[in-house]
Amino acid sequence: MLAVEPLRGAPNGDDRDGARGSFDDFADEGLLEDINFGDLFMGFDDDGDVLPDLELDPAEIFADFSVGAGEDVVSGASTDEGGGIGTVVGAAQDAAAAEGERREEEEEEEEEEKEASSHCETPAQVMSDKGRKPPAATAPAKGSSSQGKRKAKVDWTPELHRRFVQAVEQLGIDKAVPSRILELMGIDCLTRHNIASHLQKYRSHRKHLLAREAEAASWSQRRQVYAAASTGPAGVPPKRPEISPWLAPTIGFPPPPPPPVPQAHQGFRPLHVWGHPTGEAPPVVHMWLRQLAPRVPVPWAAPPTPPAADPSSYWQQQHYPRGIPHAMTQGTPCFAQPLPAAAGMQRFPAAAAAAQVPGIVPHHPMYRAVPPPTSKHASSQLQLDAHPVSAY
DNA sequence: CTCTTAATAT
DNA sequence: TATATTAAGA
């Protein structure tokens, strides 16, 4: 892959001045695997723990990049943001050429991940690597340094998202505002607007998840009540327990913490959760999210509202139906800056741990082995009951 | 001015 | 579809 050069130069200074990263690309093993029990394993054979798609046909991979043909030009100059290019899709190669080399040399050290990641790679470049050319995106608006047309669309790769989440968690959900997130992420070529936009979606998604969790939690409580009630003399059918008002479904939180994880997944290679900040993140988090989803507990009490069928689709990226482009899983498109964030992490050691908040674990279809069922929501929901219910 | 949100455009 | 852009309001 070629490095591309970000051209940033933020006149405004407001958003990022860039630094550039070096890049090495290496396979980052298991970096982001999504545990989507709904569809995981369905079609995988044993090596399911291997990224299924490292080798996809570039054509397919980038099919989705299309993007408003020709519109996305690099914004290299876009004044207000000083934005760099980012992961930009459909960015201008020319810009890269013009800018040429790197600006500053900084080494990025990253905690767990080799953050070597983020480069601002344009798909075009990636493609060039692969010898492919994007259909439309590149064509128009090239000649000049395409100053500013439209901002290139940012490709929120799992890695990028992960950093985003990490930043958000470091800051705390309530203090996470675009500008701060941007700082922490240390990824140049992102603008405040990019972040804001992503943040908007992120919050929205989180909201949904929390709501679901709350709902599920309330049900699990009922379940417990029910279980307790059913411990009567054998043969005696349990009576319907009274459900106290405070056990009634509430919209409140917090959801009960996930029970200790049985080291069940020994046989498995730990799967990382898409978007989770730390590699150490318990892989199960995601599983729990799903488990928390309401399952019909008792015959006599139907859930007040049918479990929302949407959740999985909410945050899902429908891109890369066949997997994520290799290039994306590793060298991610934007340059990582020296990570002021690293410091942040140290400052708030607890943050990392606290990062358990399962709120944000978008599934990524990338690991979907089978095409989504025709009936959109059905299958994943069904999976819910397939797991041991354990404590809940 | 920055942030948030919703609506709408691409 | 995912993301950007815009506008309105805090």
Image (spheres, coloured by chain):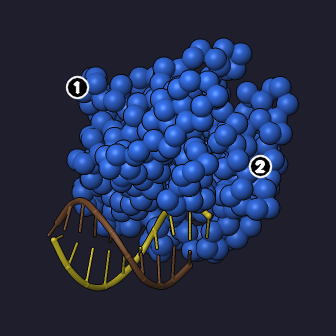
Chain colours: A blue, B brown, C yellow
- Marks 1,2: beta carbons within 8 A: no
Asked whether the viewer can see residue A330, the reply is no
- Dividing the picture into quarters, in which one does residue A60 lie? bottom right
Q: Residue C10 in the image: x percent, y percent? A: 16, 71
Q: Residue A55: give its label.
A: none
The image shows residue A232, relative to residue A318, as above or below, that is above
**Residue sitting at x 65%, y 19%:** A265
Q: Residue A305 in the image: x percent, y percent? A: 52, 61
**Residue sitting at x 72%, y 56%:** A378
Q: Which residue is mark 1?
A: A347
Type of residue at label 1? Arg
Choose between A188 and A381: the one closer to the eye: A381
Distance in Å between CA atoms under marks 1 and 2? 40 Å
The image shows residue A97, relative to residue A367, as above or below, that is below
Which chain does the residue under circle 2 lie in? Answer: A
Which chain does the residue under circle 1 lie in? Answer: A
- Horizontally, residue A46 falls left or right of residue A293, namely right
Q: Which residue is mark 2?
A: A322
- Dividing the picture into quarters, in which one does residue A342 lie? top left
Q: Residue A325 in the image: x percent, y percent? A: 70, 45
Total labels drawn: 2
Q: Earlier in the sequence, mark 1 or mark 2?
A: 2
**Residue sitting at x 50%, y 43%:** A240
Q: Quadrant of the N terminus of chain A?
A: top right
